[in-house]
Image (spheres, grey):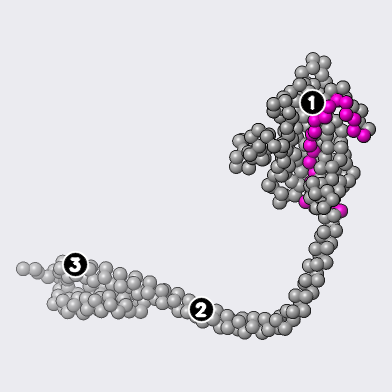
Amino acid sequence: MWERTPFESQKLVPDWFHFPLQAVTAAFVLYWHWHLPAPNKAVLALAAVAALMVLGEMRPVHKAIYFVLIISLVFTENHAINKDRSDFAQAEACRRKEENDQFSRIGGSITTNVQKLLDHNDVEFSKTMARSDAIIAGVGDAIKTQTGGDSFAFITFTLEPGYVQFNQFPPPSNPYFLVSITSHGRYPLREVHARMWDPAREFQALQHPDADPVKAGHAGDTYYEVPYLRPQSREAPSGDVLILGTYPIGAKEANDLSIAFSSPNGNWDERLHLRRVNGTWLQALTVIGPTVKQMKPFVKFDPGYPDSENLAQRDWPPPSAKKH
């Protein structure tokens, strides 16, 4: 038999009272499981249970039951707090949505009124803009006519026998290339400067035992300057062509030249390739520029030039294809 200690005999709550108290508390826990209370109510119940535990007589079984009830009340309070926060957030969201709907209705009304005002003058505004566009287009075209717009020029070589003379150029004793420049585009070109670099001539100059490295480094450079080139037109569908001079053939069967152009409308570059095929000189060229938008190379080659299909890709490989 369980006997009361002197201290337990002084408890204010008898031992038998714990069973109904625990049953009532368990009923509240079950009810609050389906119908969560307001925050802090479970805490009050928890405090009451704790107080009765102190005041009443208690066996180990009561302690175990109270421990389970206390844990259940703690979870109930936690769920009540979370639900209260969720309800508050949902209420705030509904309130903001209602305010946004009101602002949207007000904004829609203002937009409708403004649109009616704009529609009233839309026809006149369109006519004004059309006149402005025409003026701007005319001004832009006039500027491009002065600067060159997206027009460019390219240099070509033509094989000539040694006895033929062109204008003021004296005929060489051996066959040579006649150098000419051709315009391409609808706008005239002014003050075109070209620097042609022949790596074969530079390499040959550097091989000389008494060569000056500075001067030999420029041995492959040839400079041209053209004051004016007419654009392509009905009279000149291939563009304006001017003779720049002559260029020796040399003993090579092939040559590759790089030409850098500059003009008021920008800069552009040309790769000129010369190949002797079955005793006949053929040429191919690619040009890129002068504007940033003109990233697709211009290609021109003689019929029969070997491997001309991938010429532009070899001369101007895309950035992703370049080897670092």
Residue underneath mark 3: 64
The magenta segment is: 146-167
Q: Which residue is mark 1?
A: 249
Amino acid type assigned to the residue bearing label 3 in the image: Ala
Q: Which residue is mark 2?
A: 97
Taking depth in this image into account, of 47 and 84 the one nearest to the observer is 84
Q: Which residue is painted at 57% across and 80% down in the image?
A: 104
Q: Position of residue 234 (x, y in %)?
A: 82, 52
Residue 283 percent across, percent down from the top left:
73, 34
Judged left or right of residue 39, residue 262 is right
Marks 1, 2: nearer the viewer: 1
Q: Quadrant of residue 177?
A: top right
The one nearer the camera, 56 or 41, is: 41
Give the residue type at disc 2: Lys
Residue farthest to the right, as pictured: 168
Q: What residue lies at 82% left-to-right and 52% top-to-bottom?
A: 233
